[in-house]
Structures are given as structure tokens and as C-alpha cells.
């Protein structure tokens, strides 16, 4: 069972930056796709970004040019670098991992392991 622990969330003003981290308990995640999703109350969970086990990256249109996902397999960690934050980026951000192919890498139900979430709040 892989455990994922997110950190780095918080309160930031619009235009600011945050870096989220997701540390995995098992080095086997180096062979997994890892993704970030976000959710606000009353809405469905939304894809943000993902990185395949071969380091291919995918970003939602709403965050392209502002957010960047990266992974460090030596540390079993994936990062989400968030710049130019907007109030609409406010959400609970979840890290996910799984044996997920590129065709469904943006689909939350394809991921087997999830973190507990970290709150990101962007004030206007």
C-alpha cells in the first residue's frame, strides 16, 4: 500500500506562488504516473497536472503557463509549482499515484492511491 503525503498548501494573495509537494512511502512510485487534482465544495474533482513514469507531463488548460508538475524519483516526490495564482485556484489539492497510461492520465478514477489533500486559498 502506497501512502502519499501532501504539503505546501496555504493562504496566498492573487499573483503569488506556492509549491506543493507529495512524498510517497514507497519507491515503486517511480514506475507510476503521479497526478494532482483539486476539488472545491459542491464540485467534482478536477484534473490539474500529471507526470508519467517516463516523465511526460500534462497540464490542464486552466493552469498551462502558470503551473508546472515535476518529479524527483530519488526522493519519491512529485511537486506542483504554482505561479500567478488566481482566486479561482482556491481548492483542496490532492496528490494521486497509479499505474496509469497516457490515454487516461487525466482521469481521477484511474489512480489507485491518494493523499489526504492540502488546502490552497488565494485571496483577491
Image (spheres, grey):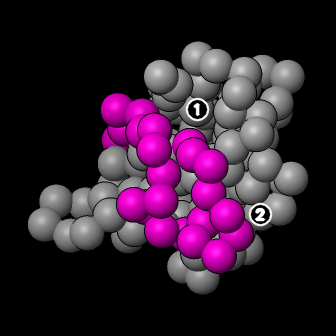
Give x and y (percent) for residue 47.
Answer: 48, 67
Locate the C terminus and report the quarter of the image it occupies. Answer: bottom left
Left or right placement of residue 118 versus residue 32 in this view? left
Count of numbered labels shown in the rendering:
2
Please say if 100 is above or below 92.
Answer: below
Alpha carbon distance from label 1 to label 2: 16 Å
Q: x and y percent of residue 121 in the render? A: 36, 49
Residue depicted at 77% across the width and 63% down the height: 57
- In the image as oriented, which residue stretches furthest toward the top? 25
Q: Position of residue 66 (x, y in %)?
A: 67, 67
Q: Position of residue 54 (x, y in %)?
A: 86, 53
Q: Residues within 10 Å of mark 2 (few under 14, many from 20)?
A: some
According to the picture, the residue beneath numbered tag 2 turns out to be 57
For the residue carrying disc 1, how many other residues have a C-alpha within 10 Å: few (<14), some (14-19), or many (20+)? many
Q: Which residues are magenta?
A: 97-124
The tag on residue 9 is: none
Q: Secondary structure at mark 2?
A: strand
Q: Residue furthest left?
A: 42
**Vertical placement of residue 44 versus 34, above or below:** below
What residue sits 65% from the left and 76% below the top?
103
Residue 28 showing in the rendered view: yes
102 or 70, which is in the foreground? 102
73 above or below 107? above
Q: Quick one: 31 or 69, which is closer to the camera? A: 31
For residue 62, side relative to residue 82 (left or right): left
Residue picked out by circle 1: 22
Q: Residue at x 42, y 39 (%)?
A: 114
Amino acid at each position: 500500500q502506497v501512502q502519499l503525503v501532501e504539503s505546501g498548501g496555504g493562504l496566498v494573495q492573487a499573483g503569488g506562488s506556492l509549491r506543493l509537494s507529495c512524498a510517497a512511502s514507497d519507491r515503486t512510485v517511480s514506475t507510476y504516473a503521479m497526478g494532482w487534482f483539486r476539488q472545491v465544495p459542491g464540485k467534482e474533482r478536477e484534473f490539474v497536472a500529471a507526470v508519467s513514469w517516463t516523465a511526460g507531463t500534462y497540464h490542464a488548460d486552466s493552469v498551462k503557463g502558470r503551473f508546472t508538475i515535476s518529479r524527483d524519483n530519488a526522493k519519491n516526490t512529485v511537486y506542483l509549482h504554482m505561479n500567478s495564482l488566481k482566486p479561482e485556484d482556491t481548492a483542496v489539492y490532492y496528490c494521486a499515484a497509479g499505474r496509469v497510461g497516457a490515454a487516461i492520465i487525466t482521469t481521477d478514477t484511474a489512480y489507485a492511491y491518494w493523499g489526504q489533500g492540502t488546502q490552497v486559498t488565494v485571496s483577491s
